[in-house]
Amino acid sequence: MEGEGTLTPRQAVSTALASTIGVGNIVGVATALVMGGPGAILWMWVSGCFGMCTKYAEIVLSIHYREKGKDGNFVGGPAWYMKKGLNSSFLAAFFTISLALACIGGNMVQANTISETIQEVFKISPVAIGIVMVILVGIVSLGGVKVLGRVTEILVPFMSVFYILGGLIVLFINIGHIPEAFNSIFVSAFSPASVGGGVAKGRGGF
């Protein structure tokens, strides 16, 4: 399927999934459970539903207000539709700065999680892991959106399969505890700690 755009539909889907599958959903869920207990899972479901709705709206607005640059590539996104749709350069600039700060914090958490996991399993120095990650991310980033799309198009299907299979294996191994787990989720869901933990993790959707 081909259409007008910098990325193919498959690459666009892969790029979107790349930001929602993996470290964040593993470490983030564990953090929410520590913060709010099993009841936090219910609120992650609720928050995730709202997150999917807002993500859909963001995508529709981004496509509607995108523009083609002189190099033939499309430019768009939340900052763009805030500037073009809401006629607010201030909101666009504020969002961009806030997003940059959030990305710094998020990337630090992800890099730290990857480094600690590899160090624990393979006994590789965190410094070496950091250098390799910088090189790999640099190659993709400097290549632009098209390179990012090609990389995610290849990697994300494998990521998705391993992610889903891993979850199913864990469920199968603990299948006898599933009814008890559901009971714990609903019984302990209505406490401030559970709500806070669930919303903190689930705000970005699944």
Image (spheres, grey):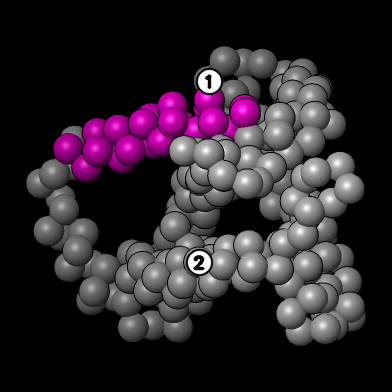
Q: Mark 2 highlights which residue?
A: 56
Q: Secondary structure at mark 1?
A: helix
Residue 119 or 149: which is nearer the viewer?
149
Residue 152 screen position, x and y as percent: 58, 33
Residue 163: x percent and y percent?
39, 36
Q: Is residue 76 left or right of residue 58?
A: right
Q: Quick one: SS at disc 2?
A: helix
Name the residue rendered at 45%, 83% in the picture: 192
State which quadrant residue 111 falls in: top right
Considering the whole magenta stretch, tell me its main secondary structure: helix
- Up the image or down, 183 lies above or below 146; here it is below
Lower sequence index among marks 1 and 2: 2
156 in the magenta segment: yes
Residue 206 disc label: none
Q: Residues within 10 Å of mark 1 (few under 14, many from 20)?
A: few
Badge 2, how many Cα within 10 Å: few under 14, some, many 20+? few
- Disc number at residue 121? 1
Front in this rendered view, residue 6 or 164: 6
Which residue type carries mark 1? Answer: Val
Who's the residue at 15% across and 60% down the image? 180
Residue range highlighted in magenta: 150-172
- The CA distance from mark 1 to mark 2 is 38 Å
For the residue marked with disc 2, what is the amino acid?
Tyr
